Amino acid sequence: MRLQIDTWCDFSRFLRLERGFGTKPQSFSVYQRRFKKLVSWFHNRDFTRLNFLVFLETEQARGLKNSYLNNFIKMAKQLNRYFHIHEFDEFRLLHEIDPVPKDILRPQDIQAMADVQIPYQSQQETINNRQKALILLLGTTGCRIDEALSLTIGDIHARPAYIVFNDTKNGDNRVVPISEELLNLISKLTRKGSYVFESRSRGKLTQQGAGRDIKERARLCNIPIRVYPHLFRHSYCTEMLNQGVDSVVLAKITGHRDPKTLMTYYHQDLNEAISVTNMHPLLRHEMNWEQEKSLVKNIYYKFYKNTTHNVHIIETKNRIVLELST
């Protein structure tokens, strides 16, 4: 069987209606590019398992990562269903090696980026407020940048405060709570039309524009890592998992059908990993004072966070005092 470019129309309909893929144009343009790449490579070859293995080996030889190649394996498995050819029924995804903990944004980094004031040439206060709302939305919900920029006023709700992300990447609608602070920020934004993140002069904020602004804010806040919109999603998932949030619950909030997918976002901070490792009785003597303080405070707060008691921690250079009162 040969892949043909004119198959795309019917195949895309299959993805939308039978497989439940999201219908946003941007998502489908990505799927279409992958489909075209396969059509180009297989133009004089049969679409078989053996030839597909050659395709993967060729791409690997070019230095492409397994995470990239897995996108084509997923596409091949969808084509397998569409054509009923059963060539890829048992085909597994490639192992994605990620031995080094990735950088993440700390809560204080996100807050600093939201609060910094950039001297724009015009509408300085308006744009800073809009960017603050966007950064807090990304940082406290773990949403994708395209989901944030697609929000309309009708997607924002109060009492309780929540937002609805419509027609997301996996085709579902998603309800996510937001803070009262963020609700108030959004309600005060000025806009040209119905989109939450737009201006009166330029219309809807673009992903490129949002990315440039986020990068500049990170620079002004002296954040020593590469900051980009999707890093907020990585950081949110990591922070919530570190706080003990159940992966099934978190998957609902972030829009993952399979909670296991969260492990691709979860990147434990190296300092935290060292601290946890040093809890072993044979290694505990290697913990320094700062690590011991951090460990004690985390255990203390987690244990009492859902109680009605008052929790206080008093720190000095060489002393830490824990107080618990009713």
Image (cartoon, rainbow, N blue to C red):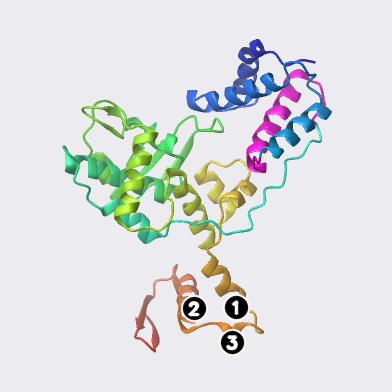
In what quadrant of the picture does the C terminus appear? Answer: bottom left
Residue 234's label in the rendered image is none
Compare residues 302 and 221 and report the one nearer the observer: 221
* Element on which disc 2 rests: helix
Kind of residue sitting beneath label 3: His
The percent position of residue 189, horizontal first and vertical second, equals 23, 38
Q: Which residue is denoted by mark 1 in the rendering?
A: 278
Kind of residue sitting beneath label 1: Asn
The reply to whether discs 2 and 1 touch (Cβ–Cβ < 8 Å) is: yes
Q: Which residue is denoted by mark 3 in the rendering?
A: 285
Residue 291's label in the rendered image is 2
Q: Determine whether 139 is above or below 166 in the image.
A: below
**Labels 2 and 1: the sequence-earlier one:** 1
Q: Residues within 10 Å of mark 2 (few under 14, many from 20)?
A: some
Position of 153 with respect to 175 (left or right) is: left
Residue 34 sits inside the magenta stretch: no
**Labels 2 and 3: the sequence-earlier one:** 3
The percent position of residue 157, horizontal first and vertical second, equals 34, 38
Kind of residue sitting beneath label 2: Gln
**Labels 3 and 1: the sequence-earlier one:** 1
What is the residue that sits farthest to the top in this orientation?
A: 6
* Element on which disc 3 rests: helix
* Element on which disc 1 rests: loop
Separation of marks 3 and 1 at Cα, in angstroms: 8 Å
What is the residue that sits farthest to the front in this orientation?
A: 62
Separation of marks 2 and 3 at Cα, in angstroms: 11 Å
Q: Residues within 10 Å of mark 1 (few under 14, many from 20)?
A: some
